[in-house]
Image (cartoon, helix red, strand yellow):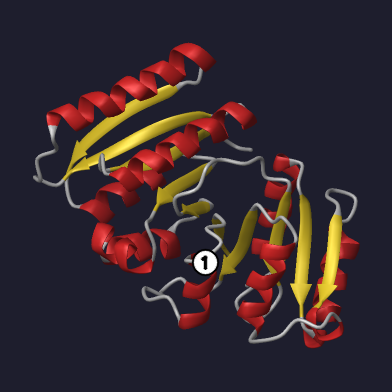
Amino acid sequence: MCNNTILIPIDFSDVCYSAVLYGLEFCRQYKLNAELFHVDTGVESNPKVVAGFKHVVDLYIKKFGIGVSFVEVKGELFETISFEMRSHEYAFILMGTPGKSGFQLLMGSSASKIINTSSIPVIVLQSKRFANVKNIVLPISRISGNGNGVVEIVKKAEFFGATLHMVYRSEGQKTAKYYQSQFEGKVNFVLENFDESGYIGTFVEQVLNYCSTNDIDMIATVLDEPKMTVFDYSYEQLLFNVELIPVMCIRG
């Protein structure tokens, strides 16, 4: 890890509250600090909500000794968060979302632009209690990106002490076995060929079925199109999955 701080954009919503609680447990488990970053876009927040929010965070700080800083900057959402991302070397960015429609309502196109332009791993979190990251699924397909992104995912799996499940169809077997041969000394690998395992449906549906039946804590994906601002259908299925599994997005 180059840095021991995660960046959590906040707007004092219920979704943000859940993300912060997850993030604080994440920091507690992996000995990280958190920066809670609020962009003042001119929309006034409820003072009671803000006070209650900060009170809960203060309790975590006092009980567990987590380093937490509050930063508030006036500006436009995407540009301000983007500048903050470029100005510091964060370990992760953690963004909460209630789901596909709520994601767009909450942050508009800014959310997708943050994911698609960030050089820092972005963990997209739907409402779910924190669990140690013991098993990560990496789909090997046209959306799995290039080798540089996979290297970063292997590093993150090593950081978590997690098993990395590379799942693929037969045409991806050569690629998956290559990655396994390159990185097996760093993390434990599980290779799963869906064409030989009886999984039904599209590749993305097979990935999500595998996650639901194998106690998966995180899905990892590599984005290799820096100008993509709208998620395609298969990627949205991964990102906003019904199992509420956090998704870690890494640029290729």
Q: Amino acid at mark 1?
A: Asn
| Residue displayed at 45% across by 12% down | 62
- With 236 as the anchor, is 40 left or right in this view? left
Picture coordinates of residue 49, whole percent (x, y): 20, 32
| Residue displayed at 42% across by 75% down | 231
The answer to whether residue 86 is above or below residue 177 is above
Q: Who is closer to the viewer here, 163 or 150?
A: 163
Residue 4 seen in the figure: no
The answer to whether residue 162 is above or below residue 195 is above
- Number of labels in the image equals 1
Mark 1 lies on a secondary structure that is loop
Picture coordinates of residue 69, whole percent (x, y): 37, 25
Q: Quadrant of the N terminus?
A: top right
Q: Quadrant of residue 118?
A: bottom left
- With 162 as the anchor, is 84 left or right in this view? left
Q: Quadrant of residue 39?
A: top left
Q: Which residue is mark 1?
A: 241
Residue 41 seen in the figure: yes
Picture coordinates of residue 196, whole percent (x, y): 87, 83
The answer to whether residue 138 is above or below residue 65 is below
- In the picture as drawn, the residue positioned furthest to the front comes out as 213
| Residue displayed at 67% across by 45% down | 133
